[in-house]
């Protein structure tokens, strides 16, 4: 029986990295063995809850218990050992490079749905059914490096405001404004709900799977798209500051590879908390390129920690694209 040796470390604790750096590459490495493989795991003490959180997925790939390489006292012999995990594409799979079989990112999300017993394997929009949109809130619970480098972080809050309220001093989070904008686009009505982070991984996956659209600011929380049924929509709100290349790299192709419709909405300076905080003449507003040239830390401090206040009138066409896609399913 072969074995796969890998470590839990680095950015584990960040939801995007847990999938992009470990779970997807592990699926690629292990799937060809049909469960007849042993996982040799190091650095478990770094994040012991990780094995509990993803126990079902690990058991779906291996019929045998995980071996803690830092505490195991036995001498173990294997005919073949794969050392480390290979990542060919962030949060996705390159089918031509999969050893032993041709796998795609759609195969991975299907594996997750089957393992978690998620009921929806496709989006189907009956005439009487209202589209369901899930807002992904920011969370401060994910592990980050001190510089914030290495993948999608979590950001400030996402606020939805009507155009007439854009410069209002109050910033209370209100998904009712998104509900109003969505209803204007689709008079039949739209169900808008905010995802809560107080359940288990399986419980959260089942909630996400019951929705048709996931919407959130660029960040690790958008990784929840792996639980959407194929044919669903991922809408990424891109913070102000010429962040489109990075944001799309992390989620655009992966979402498409999952069988989802990907859309993004780029925030204007007027929709960013930076304008009020720094003023219109600050380089972060007038010259984002200069901030990028200053290095990751400066860019992170300005552009990845801003609050976003969406002008729902400006945002409505993006929602309309999403709902038009759903109507075709």
Image (cartoon, rainbow, N blue to C red):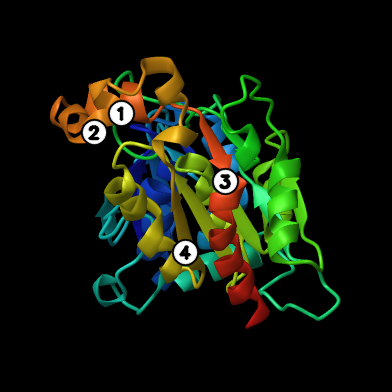
Query: Mark 1 or mark 3: which comes first in sequence?
Result: 3
Asked if marks 1 and 3 touch (Cβ < 8 Å), the reply is: no
Residue 120, by quadrant, is: bottom right
Q: CA distance from mark 2 to mark 1?
A: 6 Å
Element class at badge 1: helix
Pick the front one: 95 or 255: 255
Q: Work out which quarter of the rendered image holds the N terminus and state it.
A: bottom left
Q: Mark on residue 285?
A: 1
112 relative to 295 in the view: left or right: right
Q: Which residue is mark 3?
A: 54
Q: Is residue 167 above or below residue 83?
A: above
Query: Mark 3 or mark 2: which comes first in sequence?
Result: 3
Looking at the rendered image, the disc whose residue lies closer to the viewer, 4 or 3, is: 4
Residue 251, by quadrant, is: bottom left
Asked if marks 2 and 1 touch (Cβ < 8 Å), the reply is: yes
Q: State the image coordinates of residue 178 (x, y, percent, origin top left).
A: 68, 47
Residue 110, by quadrant, is: bottom right
Residue name at image x 56 percent, y 27 percent: 167
Query: Mark 4 or mark 3: which comes first in sequence?
Result: 3
Asked if marks 4 and 2 touch (Cβ < 8 Å), the reply is: no
Q: State the image coordinates of residue 309 (x, y, percent, origin top left).
A: 55, 35
Q: Mark on residue 288?
A: 2
What is the number of callouts on the image?
4
Q: CA distance from mark 3 to mark 2?
A: 39 Å
């Amino acid at each position: 029986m072969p074995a796969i040796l890998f470590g839990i470390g680095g950015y584990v604790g960040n939801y995007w990295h847990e999938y992009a750096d470990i779970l997807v590459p592990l699926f690629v490495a292990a799937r060809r063995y049909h469960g007849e493989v042993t996982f040799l795991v190091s650095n478990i003490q770094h994040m012991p809850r990780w094995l509990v959180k993803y126990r079902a997925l690990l058991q779906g790939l291996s019929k045998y218990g995980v071996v803690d390489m830092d505490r195991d006292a036995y001498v173990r012999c294997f005919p073949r050992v794969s050392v480390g995990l290979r990542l060919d594409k962030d949060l996705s799979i390159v089918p031509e490079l999969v050893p032993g079989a041709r796998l795609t990112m759609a195969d991975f999300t299907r594996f997750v749905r089957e393992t978690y017993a998620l009921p929806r394997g496709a989006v189907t929009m009956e005439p009487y059914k209202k589209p369901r949109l899930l807002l992904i809130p920011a969370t401060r619970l994910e592990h980050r490096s001190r510089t914030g480098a290495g993948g999608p972080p979590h950001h400030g809050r996402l606020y939805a405001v009507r155009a007439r309220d854009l410069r209002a001093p109050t910033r209370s989070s209100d998904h009712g404004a998104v509900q109003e904008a969505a209803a204007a686009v689709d008079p039949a009505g739209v169900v808008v709900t905010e995802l809560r982070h107080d359940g288990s991984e399986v419980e959260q996956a089942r909630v996400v799977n019951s929705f048709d659209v996931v919407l959130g600011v660029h960040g690790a929380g958008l990784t929840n798209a792996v639980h959407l049924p194929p044919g669903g929509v991922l809408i990424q709100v891109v913070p102000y500051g010429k962040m489109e290349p990075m944001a799309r790299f992390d989620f655009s192709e992966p979402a498409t590879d999952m069988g989802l419709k990907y859309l993004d909405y780029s925030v204007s300076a007027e929709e960013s908390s930076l304008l009020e905080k720094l003023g219109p003449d600050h380089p972060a507003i007038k010259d984002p390129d200069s901030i990028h040239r200053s290095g990751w830390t400066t860019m992170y401090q300005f552009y990845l920690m801003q609050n976003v206040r969406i002008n729902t009138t400006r945002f409505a066409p993006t929602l309309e694209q999403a709902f038009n896609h759903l109507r075709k399913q």
